Image: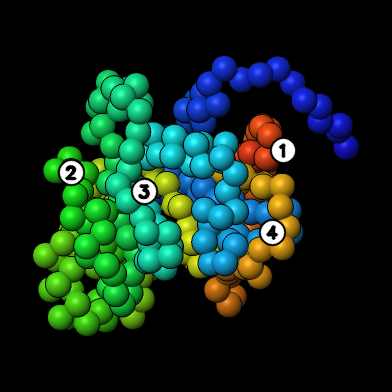
Amino acid sequence: MKHLEFGTDIEDPMAPYLAVDRSQPRHECWVTGHMVAGLDGTAAIDGKVGALSTEVDQKLFRQMRQIADVVLVGAETVRREGYGLVRLSDEAKAQREADGKPPTPPVAVVSGSLELNWNLKLFKDAPDHAPTMTITAASADPDKVAEAKQHATVITAGEERVDPAAALQALADRGHRVVLCEGGPTLLGEFVAAERLDELCLSIAPVMGGDNLPVGVMPDGGGVHNFELKSVMGEEHTLFLRYEAAQEDRP
């Protein structure tokens, strides 16, 4: 047991995250989950994550997209949160371009039903360098697929439902080696069950009493998966924890 004490200020909170070596994923891509929870484990308030997140967490949430080759999110989260385009600072965009990446990463939306609001800026105003993608299953309604193709790049991954491994392989084939998964809990749980979550960045907000919804909803038979704590930071009563999949869970 160790007693953790407040240390010195970190000049750039992104620096520890940018320093992580994500070149050795367990499988197709390096998958980073970025989630927020209350002290009681809740992952939302009145159905929305934004109501749970503190100001400092919201800032980090936006900045973390700098690490991603693609931002992955579930359709229900897009519907509830009204997802927009990825915005980064000029400095972050310049650094990405210096690293040979586009200035901002594209967003990929996982949806079996393809029941999405195509009028969102996420679809209407996606830049040419980062076109929005939708990932669906072969069983999706052909008419919905045809409609989706008018607004986004459609990827088929899985037969009856979206398969995590197939989805990540499709992204890897497009050159996306670092995937930032922003939830929701069901999507995150599916990646954990498929042993595809390499890293979890978890913010702990100083609140209790939100929805009865955990950070990750595991599918039946999803098993137990171990993670190792790699770093702890704090700001304004909010904790920022970074975990990686335990060594024994690696090939």
Q: Are marks 1 and 4 in contact (CB under 8 Å)?
A: no
Q: Earlier in the sequence, mark 1 or mark 4?
A: 4
Query: What is the secondary structure assignment of the residue under circle 4?
Result: loop
Ranked by sequence position, the earlier of labels 4 and 3 is: 4
Count residues near mark 1 (Cα–Cα under 10 Å), then give few for <14, some for 14-19, many for 20+.
few
Tell me which residue sits at (65%, 35%) in the image: 230
- Please give the residue where the numbered disc 1 appears in the rendered image: 237
Looking at the rendered structure, the secondary structure element under dot 1 is: loop
Rendered location of residue 205, percent (x, y): 67, 47
Alpha-carbon span between mark 1 and mark 2: 37 Å
- Residue at the spot x=43%, y=65% of the render? 80
* 1 vs 4, front mark: 1
Type of amino acid under label 1: His
Q: Are marks 4 and 3 in contact (CB under 8 Å)?
A: no
Q: Nearer the viewer, mark 3 or mark 2?
A: 2
> Which labelled disc corresponds to residue 127?
2
As measured in the structure, the alpha-carbon distance from the residue carrying label 4 to the one carrying label 3 is 24 Å
Dot 3: what SS? strand
Q: How is the image coloured?
A: rainbow
**Circle 1 or circle 3, nearest the eye:** 1
Task: Give the amino acid at mark 4.
Answer: Gly
Q: Identify residue for label 4.
A: 41
Q: Nearer the viewer, mark 1 or mark 2?
A: 1
In-image side of 130 versus 89 (left or right) = left
The CA distance from mark 1 to mark 3 is: 27 Å
Disc 3: which residue = 71
Compare marks 1 and 3 and give the one earlier in the sequence.
3
